[in-house]
Image (cartoon, helix red, strand yellow):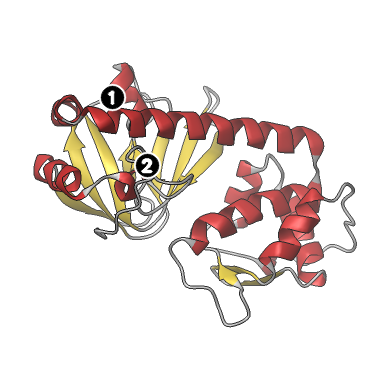
Amino acid sequence: MSERTTTRGGLAAGPGEGFWHALDGPERTALRDAGRARTYRPRAPLCYQGDDSDHIIVIESGWAKVVASSADGHSVVLAVRGPGDLVCESAVLGRRERSATVQALDELRALLVPAARFTAFLDAHPRVWMLVSGTFVRRLDDADRRLRAHVSAQGARRLAILLAGLADMSARHVAAGPGGEVPIGPPLSQEELGSWMDASRETVARALAVLRDEGLVRTGRRRLTVLDPAGLRAFARTPGDREGGAGPPGAFTM
């Protein structure tokens, strides 16, 4: 993992910069000594919904999705996590069964720390408790924003809100293109985007067609690039959807 230090005022990194990047050098060394490196293949689970809590994970490289399943087997994408993020931690600290599955989206390298060693690490480094608390608060805020977006927006605008957030997340880890375009890091399918924004695959395809026509995104097989991040954010803030024509369902496929 990068040793870049982004602590702010001795307490935490800026929003979205990741748990690992908010640790100082000695804290990183101690946490690394408490865990072990592990590689996960695409679609491999990092932890399972319903399992007892026995470890936490810090993502070094790669992307993962957080998925919850209902009793009838319906799965919903709740969030995406990337480099530097702490995952599988809430159940460990709350001493309860895991409420969601975390699954690798691509090849993912991570630091796996057993639960007892992680809590011992936190006891030995009290400052880090504040970082973990800050992570919880930001994720609650993210969930609240997602709920408000679902209530206030539909179709292309709802997808624009989601992609603007993914572009901001990706820009911290992927170099922008010469024109300022940002490749979306997490390799999400239309079905996964639809699950995240509570819409069908066909709705996602139509929304992508609108955003392409506006010159805001470019799509390809296993790729999605935000061409105009500022324009996409402006579109996301604009009431009304400008749905336009529907693009082919396979315009963005995995």
Residue drawn where x is 42% and y is 34% of the image: 135
Question: Residue 148 appears at what percent x and percent y?
Answer: 72, 33
- The residue labelled by disc 2 is 9
Residue 82 in view in this figure: yes
Q: Residue furthest front?
A: 9
Q: Are marks 2 and 1 in contact (CB under 8 Å)?
A: no
194 vs 248: above or below? above
- Determine which of the numbered discs, if any, sits on residue 92 in the image: 1
Residue 103 vs residue 57, the one in the foreground? 57
Secondary structure, mark 2, is loop
Q: Secondary structure at mark 1?
A: helix
User: What residue do we see at 13% from left, 30% from top?
Assistant: 117
Is residue 95 depicted above or below 230 in this figure? Answer: above
- Taking the spot 82% from the left edge, 71% from the top edge, the residue there is 213
The image position of residue 187, as x and y in percent, is 50, 60
Q: CA separation, marks 2 and 1?
A: 28 Å
Name the side, left or right, on which 160 lies relative to 127: right
Residue closest to the far left: 33
Residue 51 in sight here: no
Q: Amino acid at mark 2?
A: Gly
Q: Quadrant of residue 115?
A: top left
Q: Is 199 positioned to the left or the right of 111 in the image?
A: right
Q: Amino acid at mark 1?
A: Val
**Closer-to-camera residue (112/138):** 138
- Residue sitting at the far top: 95
Q: Position of residue 121 (x, y in %)?
A: 16, 31
Residue lying at the far bottom in this picture: please name it.
178
Which one is closest to the eye, mark 2 or mark 1? 2
The disc label shown at residue 49, or none:
none
Give the mark nearest the N terminus, 2 or 1: 2
